């Protein structure tokens, strides 16, 4: 990418320098509503017009891209929020898994059998917390 920039901008710089050196003559510039006429070198006038166009184009592009930048910021906020929620849910899942493991390791509790009669039999059940 670094070389591509040099390949593009070096010839443009050379052309602008050659143009500036070969067009040093002054030209009158009439600033119409003010009745003001100034003498400006031709290369300065054209390079100034070029720079003015580049600046106005950059500002225009920046203003048009405002909605895309706003949407990107909103998407980034949503991603952060969802990432946080995902981490929180992961911790909850791990906590529940740990609870299940500890509950499965508890010994069975002895409870009287509920067979409708008074048989005196005991029934083994796992307790749930």
Image (cartoon, rainbow, N blue to C red):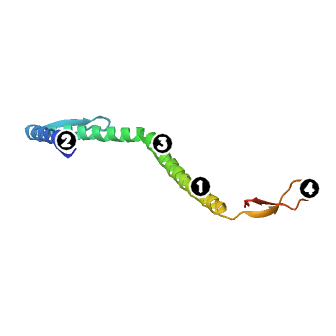
Q: Residue at x 31, y 38 (%)?
A: 34
Q: Nearer the viewer, residue 118 or 96?
A: 118
- Crowding at dot 4, Cα within 10 Å, few <14 / some 14-19 / many 20+, comes out as few
**Is 15 displayed left or right of 51 in the figure?**
left
What's the distance in space between the residues labelled 3 and 1, CA to CA? 32 Å
Secondary structure of residue under mark 3: helix
Snapshot quadrant of residue 11: top left
Going from N to C along the chain, the mark reached first, 3 or 2, is 2
- Crowding at dot 3, Cα within 10 Å, few <14 / some 14-19 / many 20+, comes out as few
The spot of residue 79 in percent (x, y) is: 50, 48
Which of the two marks, 3 or 4, is nearer to us in this view? 4
Which of the two marks, 2 or 4, is nearer to us in this view? 4
The spot of residue 105 in percent (x, y) is: 64, 63
Which of the two marks, 1 or 4, is nearer to us in this view? 4
Query: Which residue lies under the disc numbered 3?
Result: 71
Q: Residue at x 32, y 37 (%)?
A: 57
- Quarter of the image for the N terminus: give it: top left
The spot of residue 13 in percent (x, y) is: 15, 42
Query: Which residue lies under the disc numbered 2?
Result: 4
What's the distance in space between the residues labelled 1 and 4, CA to CA? 43 Å
Query: Which residue lies under the disc numbered 4?
Result: 117
Query: Which residue lies under the disc numbered 1?
Result: 93
Going from N to C along the chain, the mark reached first, 1 or 4, is 1
Residue 81 tag number: none
Secondary structure of residue under mark 1: helix
């Amino acid at each position: 990418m670094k070389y591509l920039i040099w390949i593009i901008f070096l010839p443009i710089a050379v052309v602008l320098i050659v143009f500036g050196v070969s067009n040093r003559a002054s030209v009158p510039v009439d600033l119409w509503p003010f009745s003001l006429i100034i003498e400006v070198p031709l290369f300065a006038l054209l390079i100034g017009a070029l720079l003015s166009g580049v600046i106005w184009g950059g500002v225009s592009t920046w203003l048009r891209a405002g909605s895309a930048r706003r949407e990107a910021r909103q998407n980034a906020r949503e991603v952060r929020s969802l990432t946080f929620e995902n981490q929180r849910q992961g911790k909850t899942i791990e906590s529940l898994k740990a609870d299940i493991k500890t509950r499965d390791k508890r010994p069975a509790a002895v409870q009287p059998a509920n067979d409708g009669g008074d048989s005196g039999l005991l029934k083994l059940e796992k307790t749930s917390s």
